[in-house]
Amino acid sequence: MAATHDSGATHSGPPTSPLTSDALVFFGATGDLAYKKIFPALQSMVKRGILTVPVIGVAKSGWGLEQLRARARDSLAQHGGGVDQAAFAKLVQLLQYIIAYAACSEAPPGQPTIWPFPPVSSRP
C-alpha cells in the first residue's frame, strides 16, 4: 500500500538508500540523564559501528571539552559496564561541546551559540 504525505508525493516501501545524519546533537550533556544513560548508549553505538558522525553535547555549564570527556569516562565506568578503550578513543574524537547561553549577548565574542535570534526582551 502506498502512503501519501502532505507534499503530495507517493512513496511505496522503505527508502532505497540508508538515511544518514550529519551529526548527533544532545542537550543536557552535563546532566544526570547523559551521565547515566546517554554516554553508555553512545559508547555502545560506537562499538557496533553505527555512530560515525560528530556528537555535539550542549549544556549551560561553563565546562570545557576536557571536562565533558572526563565526565563521559566516569559515566562509562559507573553506568556503562566499563570503559572500552577502543570505543572510547573513537567517541572522544567525535565528541564536541557547545555552551548554551541564555542569550547571544551573554556569549563571549567568537563563542559559538545555538540561538540564531535576539533575546525575547529585545524583539519588537
Image: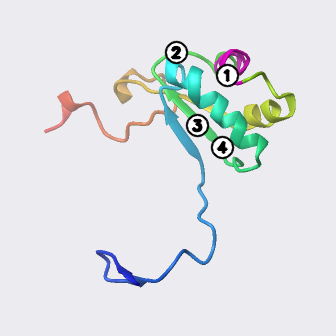
* Residue where numbered disc 3 is placed: 56
Residue 54's tag is: 4
Report if the CB atoms under discs 1 and 4 are less than 8 Å apart: no
Of label 2 and label 3, which has the lower sequence position? Answer: 3
| Nearest to viewer (mark 1 / mark 3) | 1
* Residue where numbered disc 2 is placed: 62
Secondary structure at numbered mark 2: loop
Relative image position of residue 36 (x, y in whole percent): 58, 21
Is 77 one of the magenta-colored residues? yes
Q: Going by the image, does 15 lie left or right of 87?
A: left
Is 46 one of the magenta-colored residues? no
Prevailing SS of the magenta stretch: helix
| Nearest to viewer (mark 2 / mark 4) | 4
Residue type, numbered disc 2: Gly
* Magenta-tinted stretch: 68-80
The colour scheme used to paint the residues is rainbow
Q: Residues within 10 Å of mark 4 (few under 14, many from 20)?
A: some
Q: How far apart are marks 1 and 3 (CA)?
A: 13 Å
